[in-house]
Amino acid sequence: MLLRKDKVAGHRSNRVSRFNNYLKAGVGLIEVDLANIGDHIVCAHPLDFRRGQLMIPSHEIVSLARCREYLERNPELTLLCEVKVDQEGPGFLKRYAEIRRQVGEGVRSRFVIASNSRREVLAAGQAGFPVAVFDGNDPSDPELGLIGELGANYYLPDQFRIRRAVIDKLHDMNIKVVPSVVNDFAVAEKLLGWGCDAVLTDKAVEFVTG
């Protein structure tokens, strides 16, 4: 048994080859990580760095220009672009205007900024991007209200902490629910049966092609 292609999201597509594999399989929702490298922004995870140096081969680097190209060539594609923020890092608070310029207006509605930092989500939303909230916890009703106030388009909870009742409440707020990281097929089926819009997984290709 396979999952529908619109029900899976490819996790951590920070290399051209991985991106192409997802696209070839027909996956329409793909997650990447955004990283500052000097004056440039590329798709990279903290684990892709060694002593401050990016370890992704140059031919595999996914730049913002390449993200724009992927989106222009694939009108059904949406990118979930995760901004990882630590207590010492500046994040992207001052760079969303530049990201918007590089991504372009034609595909901006499918370039979703995702973060567990509410200030990043707010800044990205104010810059005109659709936004997603990462959270490891099942939100209480007050937190649901805050998620709505942030203008979130997606909620990305931990797969083990989301409750079915919360999914319904989020849908009432027109927020899509995509739990992560779901690499067990049976768990993916269960969460989709609860009404989740998709599951974020490392096994997107396997889940849709067998």
Image: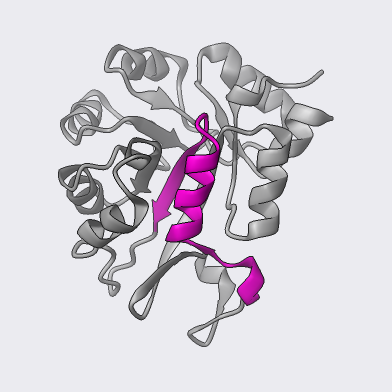
In reply to whether residue 184 is colored magenta, the answer given is no
Please name the residue shown 44% across and 50% down the image: 68
Residue 93 position (above or below residue 140)? below
In the picture, the quarter occupied by the N terminus is: top right
Q: Is residue 186 left or right of residue 74?
A: right
Range of the magenta residues?
Answer: 57-83
Residue 95 position (above or below residue 114)? below
In reply to whether residue 79 is colored magenta, the answer given is yes
Q: Quadrant of residue 159?
A: top right
Q: Is residue 62 left or right of residue 91?
A: right
Q: Position of residue 60 (x, y in %)?
A: 64, 67
Near-viewer residue (133 or 53):
53
Q: How many marks?
A: 0
- Given the current orientation, which residue lies at the most extreme bottom position? 51
Near-viewer residue (173 or 146):
173
Please name the residue shown 36% across and 81% down the image: 38
Residue 75 position (above or below residue 50)? above
